[in-house]
Image (cartoon, rainbow, N blue to C red):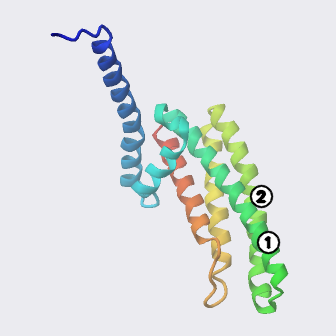
């Protein structure tokens, strides 16, 4: 006895087509992240893959769209980091530790201002990117890298100074490096 399922072949074809399309789309992220990591020592393959793949639109994105996604990720990082700094400042104020307060609080306040500027700069960079004003985007993203580096360096001014923002600053720096790699690969 033969089982005859009229949609069986169509279902298999559809599954294979969707799988290949999904694989090809994920290959765009993987292939570009490999290129970025090879070209820029500030981009690590695993971070690039995790960051871009976490954005839902990346699975079907082309290089231009990955650029917009990467700029959006920088903006999200900046918003999250600024909120985190606000929480640290409130927590630090409640503890009333004079030695910690005299060292950490001014640096956190500086970083809060820097990240406020980063948020505005990224918003402008996204608008410039959408308008294909790539030189302006390059300048703005480079200033984001400078800001997060300045934030991190502020904690290194005192011997033994430890930044509570190192991971977040590093992430912002690397996300920006990814965006700049994409920007420099455009036709």
Q: Secondary structure at mark 1?
A: helix
Residue 178 at x, y = what percent? 50, 50
Residue 86's label in the rendered image is none
In the image: residue 126, left or right of residue 46: right
Residue 138 visible to an observer of this rendering: no
Occupied quadrant, residue 87: bottom right
In this view, 15 is above or below 84: above
Q: Secondary structure at mark 2?
A: helix
In percent of the image, x 52 and y 54: which residue is there?
177
- How many tags in the picture? 2
Disc 1 crowd, CA 10 A, few/some/many (<14, 14-19, 20+)? some
- Quick check: 36 left or right of 143? left
Percent position of residue 116, x then y: 77, 58
Q: Residue 76: x percent and y percent?
A: 66, 50
Residue 10 as seen in the image, left or right of residue 51 = left
Nearer-N-terminus badge (1/2): 1
Query: Is residue 160 visible from the viewing direction of this image?
Result: yes
Query: Could you tell me which quadrant the N terminus lies in?
Result: top left
Q: Nearer the viewer, residue 94 or 82?
A: 94
Density class for disc 2 (Cα within 10 Å; few <14, some 14-19, many ≥20) is: some
Q: Which mark is residue 116?
A: 2
Q: Residue at x 42, y 41 (%)?
A: 29
> For residue 109, which numbered disc appears in the image?
1
Q: Where is residue 124 drawn, in percent x and y?
A: 72, 43
């Amino acid at each position: 006895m033969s089982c005859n399922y009229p949609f069986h072949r169509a279902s298999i074809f559809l599954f294979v087509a969707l799988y290949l399309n999904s694989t090809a789309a994920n290959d765009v992220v993987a292939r570009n992240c490999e290129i970025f990591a090879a070209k820029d020592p500030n981009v690590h393959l695993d971070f690039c893959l995790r960051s871009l793949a976490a954005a839902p639109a990346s699975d079907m994105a082309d290089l231009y769209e990955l650029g917009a996604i990467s700029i959006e990720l920088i903006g999200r990082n900046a918003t999250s980091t600024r909120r985190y700094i606000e929480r640290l400042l409130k927590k630090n104020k409640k503890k009333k530790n004079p030695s910690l307060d005299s060292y950490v609080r001014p640096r956190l306040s500086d970083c809060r201002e820097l990240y406020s500027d980063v948020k505005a700069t990224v918003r402008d960079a996204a608008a410039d990117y959408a308008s294909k004003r790539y030189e302006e985007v390059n300048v703005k993203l480079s200033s984001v890298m400078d800001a997060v580096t300045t934030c991190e360096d502020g904690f290194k001014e005192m011997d033994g100074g430890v930044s509570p923002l190192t991971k977040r600053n590093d992430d912002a720096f690397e996300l920006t490096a990814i965006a700049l790699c994409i920007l420099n690969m455009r036709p």
